[in-house]
């Protein structure tokens, strides 16, 4: 468990950014990941006074504040109306309800874990992230960037224009970290897909059709670890992409 000398509820995003420039300080999301470490922080910066816990419709975009919990994402009527069960499918296996009531979407996206269900789900949707200093940038860019000390305030999700996306994941046991995550969405000129749990951060693929995605996925590297071997993960990538594309193409359940 970490310790901290000070705790500050930031009065503005700019104040949070200023405080976060010091290496000994850290932004506190839900604290679920931070608490696994044993670091001694100087100041923990709480964003809970900045009204970042709301899911809002803004024109043709749904905006998630960084302090929105994974449980809010899972149960939001607004997200369900436009995306069906997509966001519930990408969050409901993450540990348990009490955990998801605490862990935030901002902490999940800022951490950019390779196994991240939310990052995998958000990547093929053409989302943008909003950062205090860098402003709005594509999630695709943010997901590949080295870590810096900017503060994430929002994630902006465009409403789906070409049908609902599909989310798939495989776990060895129900609430374990995923062995592989997969999300596929239609775009104007084809398909966008993300694969997580592979090796490194979740990556975005684009292809004209299902075969194009599978071909690219077969060329990616996959990690061998205690959850699964690289060959098994590569095989799963093909299965999950095929399964997701079949559902996109006509409700077929493989
Ligand atoms: C036991 C366990 C099992 C898990 N299983 C899964 C799983 O199956 N699938 C999955 O996708 N995830 C899983 N996770 C990850 C979890 O869902 C969250 O992503 C994680 O806890 C981070 O969210 P948090 O709100 O707790 O962030 P915190 O722990 O508060 O912060 C995480 C990091 O992000 C930084 N940070 C937080 N918010 C911001 C912000 N707004 N701007 C900039 N930096 C910020 C913090 O400084 C810290 O470095 C698991 C985590 C744990 C502890």
Image (spheres, grey):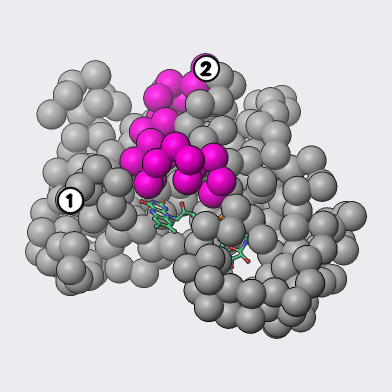
Q: Residue at x 44, y 62 (%)?
A: 113
Residue 12 point in image, percent of width and height? 88, 55
Say which residue label 1 marks.
Answer: 172
Q: Is residue 154 above or below residue 44?
A: above
Q: How far across and down, in percent of the image, does residue 154 sit?
A: 69, 46
The residue closer to the viewer here, 157 or 179, is: 179
Q: Is residue 77 left or right of residue 156?
A: left
Note whether 107 is above or below 82 in the view shown. below
Can residue 177 be seen from the camera position used here? yes
Residue 134 appears anywhere in the view: no
- Residue 181 magenta-drawn? no
Q: Does residue 196 appear to the left or right of 145 in the view shown?
A: left
Q: Residue at x 66, y 32 (%)?
A: 55
Crowd class of label 2 (few under 14; some 14 to 19; many from 20; radius 10 Å): few
Q: Which is in the foreground here, disc 2 or disc 1?
A: 1
> Is 89 inside the magenta-drawn segment?
yes
Left/right of residue 160 with respect to residue 216 in the rendered view: right
Residue 33 in picture, x, y percent from top left: 50, 62
Q: Position of residue 151 (x, y in %)?
A: 71, 62
Q: Depth check: 212 or 131 in front?
A: 131
From the image, tell me which residue sits under label 2: 81
Q: CA distance from mark 2 to mark 1?
A: 31 Å
Q: Quadrant of residue 226?
A: bottom left
Q: Quick one: label 2 or label 1, which is nearer the N terminus?
A: 2
| Image quadrant assignment for residue 239 | top left
Looking at the image, which is closer to me, 139 or 213? 139
Left or right of 46 on screen, residue 161: left
- Name which residue lies at 19% across and 71% down: 225
Mark 1 nearby-residue class (10 Å; few <14, some 14–19, many ≥20): few
Q: Residue at image x 30%, y 59%?
A: 197
Start-end of magenta stretch: 80-103
Q: Nearer the viewer, residue 218 or 13?
A: 13
């Amino acid at each position: 468990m970490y310790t901290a000398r000070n705790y500050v509820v930031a009065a503005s995003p700019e104040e949070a950014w200023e405080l976060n420039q010091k290496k000994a300080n850290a932004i506190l999301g839900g604290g679920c990941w931070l608490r696994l470490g044993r670091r001694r922080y100087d100041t923990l910066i709480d964003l809970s006074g900045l009204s970042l816990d709301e899911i809002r419709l803004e024109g043709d975009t749904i905006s998630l504040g960084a302090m929105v919990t994974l449980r809010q994402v899972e149960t939001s009527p607004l997200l369900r109306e436009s995306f069906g069960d997509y966001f519930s499918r990408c969050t409901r296996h993450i540990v348990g309800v009490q955990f998801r009531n605490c862990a935030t979407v901002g902490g999940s996206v800022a951490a950019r874990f390779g196994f991240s269900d939310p990052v995998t789900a958000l990547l093929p949707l053409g989302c943008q992230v909003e950062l205090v200093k860098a402003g709005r940038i594509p999630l695709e860019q943010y997901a590949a960037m080295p870590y810096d000390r900017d503060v994430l305030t929002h994630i902006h999700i465009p409403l789906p224009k070409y049908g609902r996306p599909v989310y798939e994941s495989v776990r060895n046991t129900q609430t374990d970290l995923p062995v592989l995550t997969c999300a596929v969405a239609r775009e104007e000129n084809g398909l966008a897909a993300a694969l997580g749990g592979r090796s490194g951060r979740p990556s975005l693929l684009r292809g004209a059709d299902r075969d194009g995605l599978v071909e690219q996925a077969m060329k990616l590297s996959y990690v061998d670890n205690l959850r699964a071997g690289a060959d098994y993960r590569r095989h799963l990538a093909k299965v999950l992409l095929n399964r997701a594309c079949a559902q996109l193409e006509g409700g077929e359940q493989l």
